[in-house]
Image: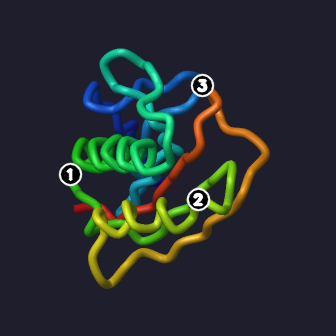
Amino acid sequence: MEEIKEIKTKAAPAAIGPYSQGVKYGDLIFVSGQIPLNPESGVVVGDDITTQTRQVLENLSEVLKAAGTDTGGVIKTTVYLTDLTTFTEMNEVYGEFFEPPYPARATVEVGALPKGVMVEIDAVAKAG
């Protein structure tokens, strides 16, 4: 049976509960939902969807980097927004981090996210 390996980096926010920043299982990497926290201070970055999305994707990229891959290895993402009317702005920033073939993606509106943030994104990637 394949071993589950924890992915951990100080370049992304530490887990704020009983979960890992990411895990590797076989050839797959599962990145926990990232929110727009500054990795050093733990403070929410930005009060607009553009700034928050950029920080989320930078955090996600750092976890992928710690796992030995990058956004080019991402197979699937899920984007959680507290206001679906911010989709266009989120999508513009999202497009800066991914290239064709783009990952499969689901985007959903949720009632609330941790620390009152506007966006959270998780990912599944193939190992580098």
Q: Up-down: is 107 above or below 116?
A: below
Residue 73 at x, y percent in the picture: 29, 67
Q: Quadrant of residue 58?
A: top left
Q: Up-down: is 78 above or below 15?
A: below
Q: What residue is shown with label 2?
A: 86
Q: What residue is shown with label 3?
A: 18
Name the residue at 36% across, 48% down. Answer: 54
Q: In the rendered structure, which amino acid carries the disc numbered 1?
A: Gly
**Foreground of the two, 84 or 64:** 84
Which label's residue is closer to the chain start, 1 or 2?
1
Q: In this rendering, which labeled residue sits more in front, label 3 or label 2?
A: 2
Under circle 1, the secondary element is loop
The tally of labels here is: 3
Which label's residue is closer to the chain start, 1 or 3?
3
Residue 91 at x, y percent in the picture: 46, 67
Residue 16 at x, y percent in the picture: 54, 22
Q: Residues within 10 Å of mark 3 (few under 14, many from 20)?
A: few
**Foreground of the two, 50 or 73:** 50
Under circle 2, the secondary element is helix
**Foreground of the two, 69 or 90:** 90
Name the residue at 62% across, 54% down. Answer: 80
Q: Which mark is residue 68?
A: 1
Q: CA distance from mark 1 to mark 2?
A: 32 Å
Residue 89 at x, y percent in the picture: 47, 62
The single residue placed furthest to the bottom in the displayed view is 101
Which label's residue is closer to the chain start, 3 or 2?
3
The answer to whether residue 75 is visible is yes
